[in-house]
Amino acid sequence: MVTLKQLARELNVSISTVSKALNDSEEIGEETRKRVKELAKLYNYKPNKVALSLKQNKTKTIGVIIPDILNYFLSKVLFGIEREANKHGYNIMTCISNESLEKEKESLQLLANGSVDGFILSIAEETQTKNEINHFKETIKEGLPIVMFDRVAHDVKCDKVIVDNFEATYNATKSLIAEGRKTIVFISNIDNISVGKLRERGYNKAILEEGLEPEVLRIKKNEDAQQKIKRLYKKKDKIIDGVVAADSSSGVIAINMARNFKRKVPKDISVVGFSSKSASYHSVPKLTNIRQHAKKIGAKAAELLINRLENKTGNLEEYSTKIVKTTLVKNKSTL
Amino acid sequence: MVTLKQLARELNVSISTVSKALNDSEEIGEETRKRVKELAKLYNYKPNKVALSLKQNKTKTIGVIIPDILNYFLSKVLFGIEREANKHGYNIMTCISNESLEKEKESLQLLANGSVDGFILSIAEETQTKNEINHFKETIKEGLPIVMFDRVAHDVKCDKVIVDNFEATYNATKSLIAEGRKTIVFISNIDNISVGKLRERGYNKAILEEGLEPEVLRIKKNEDAQQKIKRLYKKKDKIIDGVVAADSSSGVIAINMARNFKRKVPKDISVVGFSSKSASYHSVPKLTNIRQHAKKIGAKAAELLINRLENKTGNLEEYSTKIVKTTLVKNKSTL
DNA sequence: TTGAAAGCGCTAACAA
DNA sequence: TTGTTAGCGCTTTCAA
């Protein structure tokens, strides 16, 4: 990389002249400015980002800590963050906590050494089960703002972007009931994280309000989802006519598996799940899905953080929680 | 963040003493070393990464440019990169080119300002169709090494990690033929990128070798995959008994849609596709899939780059191309 | 054993 | 209009 020094030497002027010329300072004469710019272009000069960061004490970089990059929703949020950040001249450093508290702590520590100006993160599963929040508080105390999304810790003072999980499943369940469904099962492979719990509660409330009986099928990490859902359908004591899935794959599998039992979707059974557009194509008929607007969540999180970093927030002691509402997209897996 | 200067002042020693003490220099006396370290710990001192980068002229950061973060395979490669990079003390800055040449160029330019020590990337679709490679060459000329994976440009001199796409579909098609299948269709929604073309060629070779007739169904970005596959099955002139899918969703849809035509999988029709384990669960029966070992690809790419950055490569003028072999995982969508 | 000083690349206050 | 200088936080050479 060519530096100001090299340009200065070649032009027989001082370093600061070159710097000012390139920054279009009024101080520098027309002629010199032109000469400098030409040489800079010729050598494809780019100001050294590291030197700028050191000088200005900010990196224009956001640390993003994500629990699972293979989760479609989380990836899409990451996409939203990246786009919004770029728009404002920020880059992102991504760490994957892999649902581990230890890795989450490490990542936070590692990047809190001047590498980034702030963090956007969603909390790891282990962190949520152990209910650890000190590492977040420490980071904030060190002067690095955090924005949490989706899986948030309510006891940490920071900006947050969340989804209306409770309302989403409450409404979805209600809509199945409105179709005349009586035996509606809730299927979840995320019952150990905050988001999953909220979704279950929304379902429960809707079911109990109608005097129906709740039934929850929990699928663990290493279990075969197809087998578990198959067994659910096999039970003779009651015939399931509705499924609310807390995650994207359970809904898809529930539809595709129903046909093995000669149960027509949506004639005999309705299915609704949280999923992206593309995952909804994996079932025939396509899954009626609750869309979370992941990209928007990411963009909002980035916006909140950048506003704070650039002091565009009103009161710095005031933290906001933005709720991004889900949308129920009807496909052919419901009536 | 607390700095060496602050520690030095508080301890009434010089900055360099503090620096040396913290770096366990032999020069510094036992006593002083202990005092320094204690205070550093108390204040949770962390060396400023930006200052170190400037001083040492390396950032320990890798720029990763990925065409599409919502692609499961690419996300998984990213995961592999991140893990391997972390293991060696590197962080990653992620840019998403979104399949756009312009964005790819921008990202490369943007990070080639001292932000990163080198790049790992997979080429954007637009870049491949327009066959642009100058921006890569420029970057390399500026002293920033590149490692390409999956979608690579053969005319750029750099390390590469690729998949045996041709052999994978060739073998998969052969295995369907060995099952006795005669009317095997190749379905692809990625026929415009290098990888997709290679896969199609592998299929073609196997089909032609057996004197069968190739048939290719191409699905464009905005087309409804379910509709197109439905129409394929509807054609009366020939009854399809085998599907080789170039991507992960086409295979899943092909299985789930077959049942609409009362065609049993795998009795009447066999399906094989490129997919991850989790996507293979989206069809009943599960999709027999060609696994690409994405995480390994990412790890290998990171390893190649880091070796080069740290001069652990033998000859710096010598570039290697590593082929990561696919594995055919048999599930119940084939005999 | 400790400290002073230079320098990484840049900006900006101040001097000329 | 241009140049000198200091300083961002750190390491390292050289001097004390």
Image (cartoon, coloured by chain):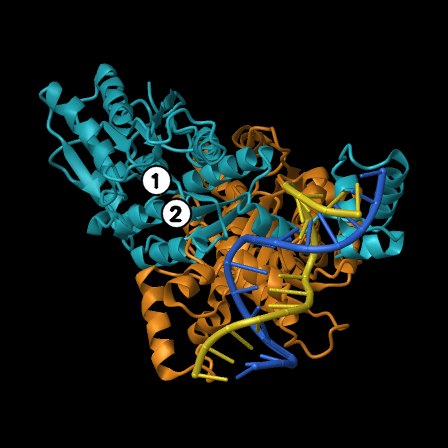
Chain colours: A orange, B cyan, C blue, D yellow
Give the residue type that dot 2 points to.
Answer: Tyr
x then y, percent, for residue A311: 66, 75
Distance Cα–Cα, label 2 vs label 1: 7 Å
Could you tell me which secondary element the residue under label 2 belongs to? loop
Q: Is residue A141 rendered to the left or right of residue A16?
A: right
Looking at the rendering, which quadrant does residue A191 occupy? Answer: top right
Task: Please state the chain letter of the residue tagged with numbered disc 2 in the rendered image.
Answer: A
The mark found on residue A281 in the picture is: 2
- Which residue is more in the foreground, B46 or A188? B46
For image coordinates 27% across by 44% down, the residue present is B189
x then y, percent, for residue A48: 49, 58
Q: Is residue C13 rendered to the left or right of residue B35?
A: left
Task: Please state the chain letter of the residue tagged with numbered disc 1 in the rendered image.
Answer: B
- Which residue is more in the foreground, B66 or A153? B66
Whether B118 is drawn above or below B288: the answer is below
For image coordinates 69% across by 79% down, the residue present is A314
Give the residue type that dot 1 points to.
Answer: Ile
**Does the residue at mark 2 contact the one at mark 1 (Cβ under 8 Å)?**
yes
The mark found on residue B253 in the picture is: 1
The mark found on residue A310 in the picture is: none
Outermost top residue: B178
